[in-house]
Image: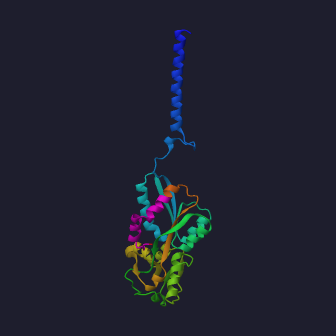
Amino acid sequence: MTRSVRRTRRTLQVAGAGIAALLALSACSGSDSSGKSSSDKDSPGKLSGEVTVFAAASLKESFTALGKEFEQAHPGTEVTFSFGGSDALAASITGGAPADVFASASPKTMKVVTDAGDAAGTPATFVRNQLEIATLPGNPDKIASLKDLTRSGLKVVLCDKAVPCGAAAQKALDAGGLELTPVSYEEDVKSALNKVVLKEADAAVVYRTDVRAAGAKVEGVDFPESADAVNDYPITLLKGARHTDAAEAFIALVRSAEGQKVLTGAGFLAP
């Protein structure tokens, strides 16, 4: 064999070994078992995507603040909310509405979702809430008790009995042995409160947190029967959540010491 032939063969062997090494390196860094490029993966611990939260109307101010905090802590995420009566939200979820997290104002409305098999895991109570009477600023009707709401000529608004705040109000009335016929039943606690804010009603039985959120627009009156009608608020991840890691992280924020500080600062009670 001539010297030039041997040199050519050795050159080809070296080139072949180099190509094999490059292919092996590409196999290690190019794709995983799912077929995704490792360069396309999010770095470990990084959250992204939209989290849709269905939450009781009374959580509006607190959850909106926590949502902004969450987005700032996790760039690339977005938290969107649907606030309303817990019963209506539960019906929407069981009806197929896309949502990742459900925060209810009562275990009863949460049970609608769990019984339908739409919850992922076991719901956890994260806060509690107590009722208060909202009156016009300055309390011109001198309302000092739940019994005062039964006075003739007084326009009182309650939440619908199917809504947690309405069920709690009825429980408080039963505890006091009182009967009350309101001028209207409202679909959620914010709607009931708004009747007083707009001076369309003299008083409403709402949550303490809503009275605080309204500021000078209303005045709050405590009543002892409210202790017999405190509502637990459960929260859960929902099946079919599109961005599970981000949804779980939002729930973790709500239940964390930082989240609890925001919630108790708004007037909620610790679980």
Q: Where is residue 53 in the image (x, y as percent from the top left)?
A: 51, 62
Q: Main secondary structure of the magenta part?
A: helix
Q: Is residue 222 magenta?
A: no
Give above or below for 181 relative to 124: below
Q: Is residue 250 magenta?
A: yes
> Closer to the camera, 14 or 165?
14
Give above or below for 21 relative to 218: above
> Closer to the camera, 130 or 27?
27
> Closer to the camera, 96 or 117?
117
Q: Where is residue 63 in the image (x, y as percent from the top left)?
A: 45, 65
> Residue 227: in sight, yes or no?
yes
> Residue 87: in sight, yes or no?
no
Quarter occupied by the N terminus? top right
Give above or below for 84 relative to 40: below
Residue drawn at 43 percent across, 67 percent down: 62
Question: Along the horizontal axis of the image, is 116 left or right of 167?
Answer: right
Q: Residue furthest front?
A: 1
Span of residues in magenta: 248-270
Q: Position of residue 242 (x, y in %)?
A: 55, 55
Q: Residue furthest top?
A: 2
Quarter occupied by the C terminus? bottom left
